[in-house]
Image (cartoon, grey):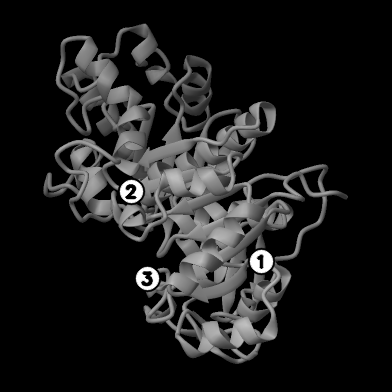
Amino acid sequence: MTQPLSGLRFLDLTRLLPGPAATMHLADFGAEVIKIEDTGEGDYMRVMPPRVADADGESVNPVFAAVNRGKRSMRVDLKTAGGRDVLLRLVETADALIEQFRPGVMDRLGLGWDVLHARNPRLVRCSLTGYGQNGPLAQAAGHDLNYCALAGVLDQNRASSTGAPAIPNLQIGDLLGGTLASLSALLMAVIGAQRTGQGSRVDVAMTDALLVHHFMPHAVLDGGDTPVPSQTLLTGGVPCYRIYETRDDRHLALGALELKFWQAFCEGAGLSDLAKRHWALGETPGSQAAHDTIERVAARLRERTLGEWLEALAKVDTCVAPVLTPAEALQHPQALARELVHRRGGVTHVGRLARFDDAAWTPPATASSGAHTFELLRELGYKEKAIEELRATGSVRGESS
């Protein structure tokens, strides 16, 4: 089967998690992705813990190996004239370039939009940053936690025991605000370039994307109230949408937002007298009445173990799920049936973003640093003498010549 992105070439100048994960998705669906790292330290994630042995017995960071699978690898010093020439030759052959530098860095390198656009008018350039290309924080340093804080996300993610904001172990800012936002924007821009013959500049700010998608708290504000964690519809303020503890100190996630699902749950849990205690019938989120119902449900669910409740509710048409550990999630029958989990050496690769024509998929290998440098230079038309000069001046690095 022809991959949906076959024939497209993306230049990846990003590091760490959000940008590399975006281009991982592109590579997973057939695009050629060329990962371009500097000739010094390169992508910082290469050397971060934890470390595992890959399929070749080499010590790798498993996140790095996962998000950089299927890419070709070059090492180029963009601060040298030779390195800039290499990148510009690549630009002539590419559909898009994605970079993750602070605003202005590409211009200072002599690789600003005007230069890139002149070399390839169809090129899309995506700039992925925390705060965007303008505004008072444009030059500020930041990471996932900072973007979630500024967008109001952390305020709504508070530990019930202390009331303090809790750090999610899903990098929401990096992966929703960065990876998925830049992936969507890149593909939209590439489609536009194919239709018009003109590339475009794409400015993706992780904080922007979080703010854009924070619909529920904004709706509460529009209604004249302040969104208080644990007191609104989707933060546990109603009995039908909460996390409950079971007798064995495990947890059951109940998501019976619709009345029919709540009524089915109440019947299956032996709480039929609570069937009318639902937000759609006037149970106000965060109210004392809602709190009293929550206490009734909590007491009932503490009477049995998680396994017993899952068995009891298995044939009930309602929205319940066990709160699994990451290890349990990888082994759940649903994940296995979907053929999501693949392992190469000590690295776990979890599926692709979507299934196309139900085709089987195997994760490709992750290239070692600079594995394709000299191969790509030859493809670009560099002669051996010119390649040796680039290597000797430190403009490029690779595994071998």
Q: Residue at x 71, y 75 (%)?
A: 378
Whole-Å distance between the Cαs marked 3 and 1? 27 Å
Check disc 3 and report its element: helix, strand or loop: loop
Amino acid tagged 1: Gly
Pointer 2 local density, CA inside 10 Å: few below 14, some 14–19, many at least 20: many
Q: Nearer the viewer, mark 1 or mark 2?
A: 2
- Compared to 375, does 242 lie above or below? above
Q: Residue at x 55, y 86 (%)?
A: 389
- Provide the residue designation for mark 3: 79
Check disc 2 and report its element: helix, strand or loop: strand
- Numbered tag placed on residue 129 in the rendering: 2
Amino acid tagged 3: Lys
Pointer 3 local density, CA inside 10 Å: few below 14, some 14–19, many at least 20: few
Question: Tag 2 or tag 1, which sits nearer the N-term?
Answer: 1
Pick whichever, 197 or 275, lies toward us: 197
Q: Residue at x 58, y 81 (%)?
A: 368
Residue 370: image location, x then y, percent = 56, 80
In the displayed structure image, the side of residue 97 where residue 159 appears, left or right:
left
Pick whichever, 63 or 242, lies toward us: 63
Q: Is residue 110 visible?
A: yes
Residue 77: image location, x then y, percent = 43, 74
Amino acid tagged 2: Thr
Whole-Å distance between the Cαs marked 1 and 2? 24 Å
Whole-Å distance between the Cαs marked 3 and 2? 21 Å
Q: Nearer the viewer, mark 3 or mark 2?
A: 3
- Provide the residue designation for mark 1: 70
Residue 65: image location, x then y, percent = 54, 73
Picture quadrant where residue 211 is located: top left
